[in-house]
Image (cartoon, rainbow, N blue to C red):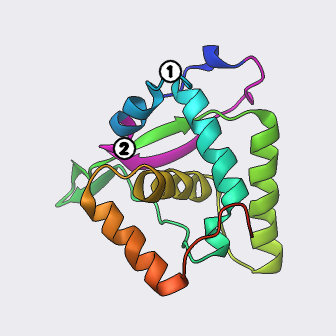
């Protein structure tokens, strides 16, 4: 999805993840903001905030990806999910990989770059830039269960 023309120093290979079909259009809508002007700039901003806020240390669970196709009676059926490529700067990608490695070694939790990236997108769309009242209700339930997230701590 991302266009590599936006940044000169983007890592060579994208992080391949999967998202619900509606997510790319919502992200493109948010990327139209004059301060960003591209999907790559938005994804960089989201990952920067995700790594700074560390909501996964404050109660956010890493999201489980769904397949794009499942088989019913031997026939392929679309699931409502699609592949989404995320291009990040080499620095951000390295920081993300360091966090993932920490989860693997310290907590013995298998987190993949795809899980991490989708969780970041989910967090942003559900709590930072919710579109409807349902995500706001979800955020309120997280606050009740885990307390208010304190920005920049963790």
Give the residue number, with chain letter if any, for mark 2: 23
Residue 56 percent coordinates (x, y) = 62, 70
Crowd around label 2: few <14 · some 14–19 · many ≥20 (10 Å): some
Q: What percent of the width, then of the height, locates residue 77?
A: 21, 50
Q: Residue at x 52, y 53 (%)?
A: 118
Q: Residue at x 83, y 74 (%)?
A: 105
Label 1: which secondary element: loop
Q: Quadrant of residue 141?
A: bottom left
Say whether residue 122 is left or right of residue 130: right
Q: Residue furthest bottom?
A: 145
Q: Is residue 119 magenta?
A: no
Mark closer to the chain start, 2 or 1: 2
| Residue 149 drawn at (x, y percent) | 59, 71
What SS does tag 2 mark? helix
Q: Quadrant of the C terminus?
A: bottom right
- Residue of label 1: 34
Taking the spot 75% from the left edge, 71% from the top edge, the residue there is 103
Bin the neighbour count of mark 1 within 10 Å (Cα to Cα): few under 14, some 14-19, many 20 and up.
few
Magenta span of residues: 8-24
* Residue 128 vertical placement versus 61 (above, below): above
Quick one: 23 or 115, which is closer to the camera?
23
Left or right: 8 in relation to 64: right
């Amino acid at each position: 999805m991302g266009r590599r023309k936006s940044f000169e120093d983007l890592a060579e290979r994208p992080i391949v993840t999967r998202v619900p079909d509606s997510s790319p259009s919502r992200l493109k809508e948010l990327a139209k903001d004059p301060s960003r002007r591209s999907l790559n700039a938005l994804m960089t901003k989201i990952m920067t905030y995700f790594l700074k806020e560390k909501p996964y240390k404050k109660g956010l669970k890493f999201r489980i990806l769904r397949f794009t196709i499942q088989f019913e009676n031997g026939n392929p059926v679309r699931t409502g999910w699609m592949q989404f490529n995320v291009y990040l700067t080499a620095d951000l990608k390295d920081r993300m990989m360091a966090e993932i490695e920490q989860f693997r070694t310290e907590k013995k939790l298998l987190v993949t770059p795809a899980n991490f990236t989708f969780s970041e997108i989910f967090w942003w769309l559900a709590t930072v830039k919710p579109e409807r009242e349902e995500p706001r209700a979800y955020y309120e339930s997280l606050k009740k269960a885990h307390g208010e997230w304190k920005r920049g701590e963790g």
